[in-house]
Amino acid sequence: MRLHYNVNLRQDRQEILFGEISYICFLANLFFQMTNILTENEGMHQSAKPKLFEFARHHRENPTQAEEILWEVLRDKKLEGNKFRRQHPIAGYILDFYCHKFKLAIEIDGGYHFSQVQLEYDKKRAMDLNERGIRELRFKNEQVMNDLGLVLELILSSLCARTPYP
């Protein structure tokens, strides 16, 4: 294989300008494509579908009372300077609250979460999130509304126990 290239060296700016290095450009492009493929699932949303974002927006506009209470404490980095997102789409799920720095999800469960079908779904979801490196904390609506201090202590202890994600 024969490579054609011109290298112009300008010492005043210490820049190397490459002319036609099509093979190197090809390799660089291939590298960036592979990097995107390898890191796609590690992003903020881990391949969440566009429809999921619409559902998340709807949930943000219609929070439960317990979600409103907890969001007031978590929003704007109020909890020890940690940024939380509300109704965050990730993979095929919407997380009630999510701290990407520590890969921590917080779920607030209402009454429907206690049916057998929902319990099985929640268990599968927790395992799937765990495989993605995301730890999930679950609280009942009543816990948030009646004992917010304890809920916050548990959240903080979970944050302290985890290593920040770069």
Image (cartoon, rainbow, N blue to C red):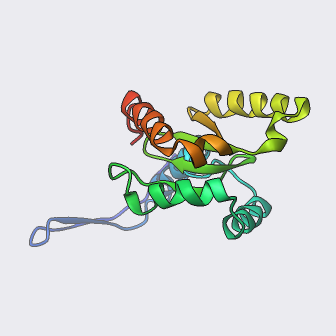
Measured as percent of width and height from the top left, residue 53 is found at: 71, 63
The residue lying toward the viewer, choosing from 45 and 153, is 153
- Residue in the image at 53% along x and 41% along y: 147
The residue lying toward the viewer, choosing from 103 and 91, is 103
Relative to 103, 62 lies left or right: right
Measured as percent of width and height from the top left, residue 103 is found at: 50, 40
- Residue in the image at 69% along x and 31% along y: 126
**From the viewer's perspective, is residue 154 above or below residue 26?**
above
Relative to 81, 128 lies left or right: right
> How many numbered badges does the structure rendering display?
0
- Residue in the image at 67% along x and 45% along y: 141
The quarter of the displayed image where residue 41 is located: top right
**From the viewer's perspective, is residue 56 above or below residue 93?**
below
Q: Quadrant of the C terminus?
A: top left
Measured as percent of width and height from the top left, residue 102 is found at: 44, 40
The residue lying toward the viewer, choosing from 116 and 89, is 116
Residue at the limit of the structure toward the left, as seen here:
12
The quarter of the displayed image where residue 49 is located: bottom right
Relative to 126, 120 lies left or right: right
Relative to 15, 146 lies left or right: right
- Residue in the image at 75% along x and 63% along y: 50
The residue lying toward the viewer, choosing from 44 and 95, is 95
> Is residue 36 visible to us here?
no
Measured as percent of width and height from the top left, residue 81 is found at: 33, 53
